[in-house]
Image (spheres, rainbow, N blue to C red):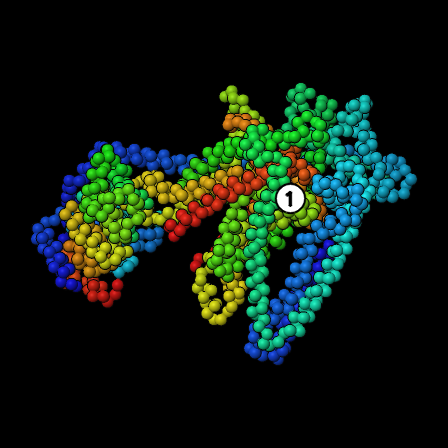
Amino acid sequence: MQLTVLLVVLAVLAVVGYHLGRSRAANAVGGRIVQLHSVPAYYGAYVALWAGLPAFLLFVAWGVSEGWLVMQMVLAGLPDRLTSVDAQGIALLKADLLNLAHGLNTGRQPDPAVVAGAEHYNALRQLGDWAVLGFGSALAVAGLWYARERISPRMRARNQVERVINIVLIGCSLVAILTTVGIVLSLVFEAARFFMAVNPLEFLFGLHWSPQMAIRADQVGSSGSFGAVPLFAGTLLITVIAMLVAVPVGLMAAIFMSEYATPRMRTALKPILEVLAGIPTVVYGFFAALTMAPFVRRIGDAVGLDVSSESALAAGVVMGVMIIPFVSSLSDDVINAVPQSLRDGSYGLGATKSETIKLVVMPAALPGIVAAVMLAVSRAIGETMIVTMAAGLSANLTANPLEAVTTVTTQIATLLVGDQEFDSPKTLSAFGLGLVLFIVTLTLNMIALRVVQKYREKYD
Amino acid sequence: MTTQTQSRMGATMNAPSALPAVPVKMQARDVKVFYGAKQALKGINLDIQENRVMALIGPSGCGKSTFLRCLNRMNDTIENCRVEGRLTIDGDDIYGRDIDPVQLRARVGMVFQKPNPFPKSIYDNIAYGPRIHGMASHRDEMDEVVQKSLQRAGLWNEVKDRLREPGTGLSGGQQQRLCIARAIAVSPDVILMDEPCSALDPIATAHIEELIDELRENYTIVIVTHNMQQAARVSQKTAFFHLGDMVECDDTEEIFTNPRDERTQGYITGRYG
Amino acid sequence: MTELADPDVRAVSPARSRYQSDEFVARLRRRYAAEQRFKYAGMAAIGLASLMLVVLLGSIISQGYTAFQQTSIALDITFDAAEIDPQGTRNPEVLAQANYAKLIRDSLGTVFPEATSRADRRTLSDLLSSGAPFELAMMVRDDPSLVGTTKRVWLTASDDVDQFMKGFIPRNVAETERRVNDVQVAAIDRLASKDSIEKSFNTTLFTAGDSREPELAGIWGAIVGSFMTLAITMALAVPIGVSAAIYLEEFAPKRWWTDLIEVNINNLAAVPSIVFGLLGLAVFLNFFGMPRSAPVVGGVVLALMTLPIIIIATRAALKAVPPSIREAALGIGASPLQTVLHHVLPLAMPGILTGTIIGMAHALGETAPLLMIGMVAFIVDIPGGFTDSATVLPVQIYMWADSPERAFTERTSAAIMILLGFLVLMNGLAVFLRKKFERRW
């Protein structure tokens, strides 16, 4: 709340600063604006930046560090009997504190000291927010005053403002890099914790997956087992099925659209693919689970096959349908990049349209199409909702598309949904899987994007 | 004009024109072409004689390329393009029912402005046409077709050791000769050339021009060109197009020395172009 | 024109026969057959894609359209003052605590006097939603003068009755096979004969939050959650994305590190969405201690996910502005920044807007990363702020899809229809903007 107020205050001060700066600059030269180094708007922007930016940075810094900072202070204030435990205990304690502080039920009778800690936590946050509001507003007013005082006709306001804007623009570009760094660090760190508990070789090559850990160490099967091969195999199976649907259909659709369809047909047919592309994956998942899976099962029954109600086939086919527009739009780009002169050369020799496509256009477009298929595979591997809703959780190691399999993404989603303590190998295994998923899709994407780029350069 | 080209032109003019009646290979009667509502050709009448080189000249946008593309129905690939009138090859109506564009294009080959070899090996570039038309039943026969076509296009000696290398690796002039060889490989009667030298340097151009002169023995050639000297060097007949009309068609020598229409005169003397 | 020969004079060429040989013609026929087959294969591909779309939309609409109606039952309720407010204080707290379920039981007892056993009476009570007493409480709260009167009121029926009325629970099967027993069927028939049971527009679906009872569940909470999440996403992704695109397209020097950013953005666009969820979980929840299930975290995660889409679209729009515009502005002494802000950016605006809307539509339909950060919790209340626990429309669909009741399947389909409606609206806006401001240079 206080932080929202601060943002409003900053916005108002920036606007006020802009007008003050502009009028002061104009007054300084008695209205003869040509005598100014920059147009008055730049003096306004200069003051506005001084008023808004430092306080805004404070706001961001506080917003980012608030949770961590306050938590450290709360932990320091708790009695030793609570805090002198191992890392796992601390994490559990933190989770309890946060849940209590946000008014959620922890599911067990909380220790009074922890309740007090949670109240302390909330109080500190309130206090901090008020402090930031007060200090931020003061900073903004001071900045405004300082900048306004510095305005003189010879001040190079434009250069200074543009330099700041340039830095802000660079900062925005770096967000993308930070995101990647964040992804890599979070995956690597959490996965490393997982691999401390589970041997990476067992994870990558083990044939048995059952992440359920017993609550007490003396229970049967307390260790769980983390051999991810069944997940990889399941992912592969569903991806192959999806590609068997998406690649021929998508490619032929693209060929038809770009080579055969009249412009009028194209405008009529294109929306079909666009709508297919725009449907959220959760809708495909619902369709796979409630329409496609029973349908496949009925067909199987009719021909006397035993089909699981969560068959890989149903999930794979629906995923293939989802990827059709992806393949077709990428292929469409690639096919259109093949120069018309090659087609003319082929027609000029008396080739039919299909001969031209099969013998000239496709070979010329092949690298691009291979890249498109790779991107589609990466997409299929990373798709979560369809498989979570339709493929089920049984980690079978099978190549039979009529059986139920599970995939890497399904496991990640189920392992992390709901409340979980963040330290058991069960939860952390999701990050191990995530790391594998990230590496595989990244490799596919990198190669594919490189190929596409090379291909474009060739015909540009 | 240099003396060399003059003498060559003289030589080409003497022999065939001396013969009394040259058979007509292709004939256009009142050919009109529309792109949508826009009329590109306004009733063209033209006879193309067998084993002669016919040059089509005229300022850009005059319809000469459009006319050329009518001769093997390449205009079919352009949407909204409509052709009226009668075009014949050996008396068969090109736009008639019993003539198929695929069949026609095997009879009337085409070479384009920019060399457009397929991204395949030199061998496969030449073999493409014979393969789709089923002209060679086994490998030896195909090898022979490829060799003969490359020899006729004067490219054999330059590429015989690298037939498996991509055709796109050749120089511009070689690429264009490859495209001519590719057209020859399906043994057409007529070869259409749409400004075949406009993307080439003078030496490569000279090569192609010599080649055209040699090919005349076996093929009927129609060439569109912007370059009047080139028309004078390689052709026996020249037709001058202007704003969708065929203004004048005559022996090349006649057109360049004694044009009857003042528009032709204006164009060849460089008053506009 | 000179020497035009008669068109009918045929010059016979020796080569001509080859193209009309039987062999060539037969081959040509085969080639054309192959051509047709290829073309039909293309049409079949398009046809298959269209068929799947029709089946998909058809199955959702046919399963979901019934959810827009809800059965209710009319009962003569005696708002007995002795029961509701024995002291006569009309104190709202007392009114709220009263046993309204008993009023309903009494009313049912007068309609069905033959039902005397406890089991039968309970069976009859099950005709009504477990939320029905609450509906009465709300009525009395809004109008305390009802106390002491008798009034015919419409109360929400239970989901089983609703499904029975919609014909999804067949009559002609054994009693043990259906969720509505014979006593209830007879009661429904009796009510129907007195026009006391009917289907009407299902406003609950649009106004309520989530519930375990299908007939009380609505998507308003999810819509509000989606709206808040998207607001955060837009507030972050659009300014940052557009700024980054401007920098990369207009100002960035061609160095190794700008190449790196470029490659990085292209790859980020293809990273599976669930990985962004892992990032959100590890960084925002665990490291920064942001609240679980909150729209603010969901918004940030989706913003990071949409950022590459917006950057790529904006760069394409900026690239489409011809260099001559920039040269003209620079030529009259504008600074590079002024050139971009005054000339290039306004011209690129339609493209940027279109890209932004498409990115937002993408974010609106995204589910997987939000599961990771706990937006999958069961939340009854309508979220009131960016840090309240909330869910979003696609996650609500995911949760309802998991519920076994037939009535939830119906509502899931309806929620999908509403989600698709929003997406159609957004994409329609994007298409409209593109058409309206389309410019050819």
Along the horizontal axis of the image, is A314 left or right of B189? right
Which amino acid is tagged 1?
Answer: Leu
Q: Which residue is drawn at 62% across and 80% down?
A: A30
Along the horizontal axis of the image, is B10 left or right of A459? left
Q: Where is residue A404 in the image (x, y as percent from the top left)?
A: 56, 28
- Closer-to-camera residue (A181/A218): A218
Q: Which residue is drawn at 21% across and 35% down?
A: B141
Q: Which residue is drawn at 57% across and 34% down?
A: A203
Position of the N terminus of chain A by quadrant: bottom right
Q: Where is residue C6 in the image (x, y as percent from the top left)?
A: 15, 48
Q: Which residue is drawn at 55% across and 56% down?
A: A173
Q: Where is residue A281 in the image (x, y as percent from the top left)?
A: 56, 39
Q: What element carries label 1?
A: helix
Residue C36 seen from this side:
yes
Q: Where is residue A438 in the image (x, y as percent from the top left)?
A: 55, 42
Residue B250 seen from this side:
no
> Disc 1 sits on a residue from what chain?
C
- Residue holding disc 1: C281
- Closer-to-camera residue (A195/C162): A195
Along the horizontal axis of the image, is B49 left or right of C411? left
- Closer-to-camera residue (C364/A273): C364
